[in-house]
Amino acid sequence: MGTKRNFRVWRGDASGGELRDFQVEVNEGEVVLDVIHRLQATQTPDLACRWNCKAGKCGSCSMEINGMPRLGCMTRMSTFTEDETVTITPLRTFPVIRDLVTDVSFNYDKARETPAFAPPPSLAPGEYRMQQVDVERSQEFRKCIECFLCQNTCHVIRDHEENKPPFSGPRFFIRAAELDMHPLDSQADRKEHAQASMGLGFCNITKCCTEVCPEHIKITDNAIIPMKERVVDRRYDPLVWLGRKIFRR
Ligand code: SF4
Ligand code: F3S
Ligand code: FES
């Protein structure tokens, strides 16, 4: 037998909305997405919520839970105390379609702007060979489930709508880093492209993206900072050079 717990859920659409209070039964072992499904089954059949796998792998159920960007299917109700009201709101960085569903097409636009993997034209399909060591270097970035929680949390666009056109965001910085590590990618320099066309310079390495990544990808340390450092190396910034001499001995 479950216990009744308090929830506050945002309901509305592009024209506006409000937080509504509900009491919902919660059973042992349940996650926030279970509660949303019970709400739909018992009180609000028209509550809109995007989900698919319920296993933390499709990246669909991104939402904000008590103000933190999280996956609904991977957030256990045992995270919260029994008397705590759990507030569920849609991702703040993207426009609301309805209730908990946002329009994440910003991210698809940015994906289209990222030049695709381009093997050397001299290699026919089937002739690609990669060393295991090269596979392992970029494997971390390939774990991305495209939940866009990192995109949603990065303050560069979360608080500044005007930054969206020039800034691709952390998800696409790891894509650039992944392709940069690929020995067969013959596209123009990925680091320079990230700097010149993806807004890498807007990132001031706050690491909030890394903190919310459900795949625990070290976005800032393993992708963004190495790319920034190498762009700086190329441009030979004497201050950075001096800083390294002094601090990295
Ligand atoms: Fe989600 Fe992490 Fe991929 Fe960002 S990098 S979209 S937080 S899985
Ligand atoms: Fe944004 Fe991550 Fe950089 S949160 S500012 S992309 S370190
Ligand atoms: Fe697929 Fe949550 S439903 S990640």
Image: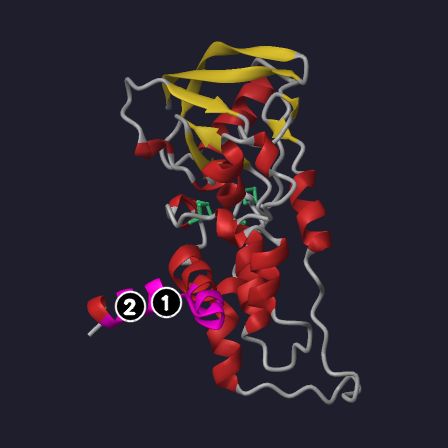
Q: Is residue 145 visible?
A: no
Query: Which residue, given by chain and number where applicable, does mark 1 sit on?
Result: 238
Q: Quadrant of ligand 3?
A: top right
Q: Nearer the viewer, residue 195 or 223?
A: 195
Q: Amino acid at mark 2?
A: Leu
Give the secondary structure at mark 1. helix
Q: Position of residue 68 (x, y in %)?
A: 41, 32
Residue at 53%, 66% in the rendered image: 177
Left or right, residue 104 beside residue 237? right
Residue at 53%, 24% in the rendered image: 38
Left or right, residue 121 beside residue 220? right
Give yes or no for contact between labels 2 and 1 (Cβ–Cβ under 8 Å): yes
Image: magenta residue range: 229-245
Quadrant containing the C terminus is bottom left
Q: Position of residue 26 (x, y in %)?
A: 40, 25
Left or right, residue 170 beside residue 101? left
All told, the count of numbered labels is 2
Q: Residues within 10 Å of mark 2 (few under 14, many from 20)?
A: few
Query: Which residue, given by chain and number where applicable, does mark 2 sit on?
Result: 242
